[in-house]
Amino acid sequence: MSKSITVVGAGLVGRGWAIVFARAGYAVRLFDVTEEKITEAFRVIDKNLSDLATYHLVADPVEIRGRIRGTTDLADAVGEAIWVQECVFEKLEIKREVFAALDAKAPADATLASSTSTFPGSAFTSEVKGRHRCLVAHPINPPYLIPLVEIVPTPWTSQETTVAARVFMAAVKQVPIVLKREVPGFIVNRLQVALLSEAFRLVEDDVIGAVDLDHAIADGLGLRWSFMGPFETIDLNAPGGIRDYVARFGQPYYEIAVEQSPARKWNEPLVSKVEQECRQLLAADRLQERQRWRDLYLMSIVANKNSRRED
C-alpha cells in the first residue's frame, strides 16, 4: 500500500491505533512532539506485539513493527495520509489547534478522525475549513484487542465521509457502529454510565460490596455480553423471543428503572468506600501488573472468539 495512515499522539490510545493500522498492512506515521515520547511508545508497542504473537493474533510482529515510523514533524507525518487518527490530550483548545493544523497540512482527500471519548466532534471542528471530512472514530481500549469503533459524524460531516469511514474501519478488521447524530458520551460510555451508576448506588446503599458487585458482571452478565448484546440476550431468554420477554418482565423492569431515578453523584465517601475494598484486593503498586493481566486475558478471549467466527 503506497498511502499511509497517520496517528497523532503516541500515548496509550495512539499506540493502540498504530498497531491496528500496521497490522492491516498500512504504513503508519506515528507523530508526537518529542523523540522521548516516540521512543517510549515503541517500547510498549514491541511488548504488545510480542504478546499478540504469543496468542497467535499476529503472524509476524517484526513485519508489523517495521511498518510504523515515528516522527516529530507533523507535515512529514501527514504528507501522504489517507486517514489521520488524532489521539491528543482531552482538551478542547488543543483539539481545535490540532485539527486546524491537520486540515492545513494533510492531503485534501484525507479523513480527519478524532479518538475523543469526551467531546462531540462539532465542539472542535466548527471552524475547520475542511470540516466536511472531520468526524469522531472513538475506540475502546486497547483497539487492537477490542475492535469496536464508534463513528460519530458532526452535523457538517459529509455522508460520503461517514460511509467511507465505516468501510475503512471494517477493512482494518475493526467493528464500526455509526451514530445517526451526536449525543454526549456516544453509545458505549452511555451504557457504561448506566451500569456504573447502579453499581455505585447498590454499594452506597449497603446492598452489596464492591468486589461481589464485580462478580455479578464478571461471572454473570459479562459472560453472555462478551459475545452477544443486550437485545439478543433477552431475545433468547424467553420462549417467544423479545416480545415475550417484554410481556413477562417489562413492567417490573420499568418499576426498577423508576426506583433508580434520579441519578446520584459519586461523592467522596462513596468513592473512598469502593476504593478501600478494591485496594484490599489489589494494591495500588500492582495496578500496571494487573492491567497487563487484563490484556493477556483479553487476548485469550479474542483468540477463542476468532476461532468460532464461523459458528
Image (cartoon, rainbow, N blue to C red):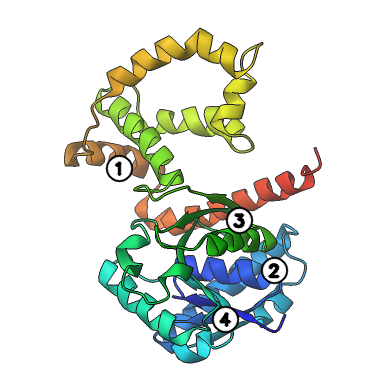
Q: Earlier in the sequence, mark 3 or mark 2?
A: 2
| Quadrant of the rendered image containing residue 260 | top left
Q: Position of residue 1 (x, y in %)?
A: 72, 80
Out of 271 and 308, give the one closest to the viewer: 308
Q: Looking at the picture, which amino acid does disc 2 mark?
A: Ala
Tell me the number on the disc at residue 162.
Answer: none
Q: Position of residue 121 (x, y in %)?
A: 38, 61
Q: Position of residue 279 (x, y in %)?
A: 34, 44
Mark 2 vs mark 4, CA separation in Å: 15 Å
Q: Secondary structure at mark 2?
A: loop
Residue sitting at x 35%, y 28%: 209
Up-down: is 10 above or below 245? below
Check contact, mark 4 vs mark 1: CB within 8 A: no
Q: Looking at the picture, which amino acid does disc 1 mark?
A: Glu
Q: Earlier in the sequence, mark 3 or mark 4?
A: 4
Going by the picture, which residue comes out furthest to the top?
248
Q: Looking at the picture, which amino acid does disc 3 mark?
A: Leu
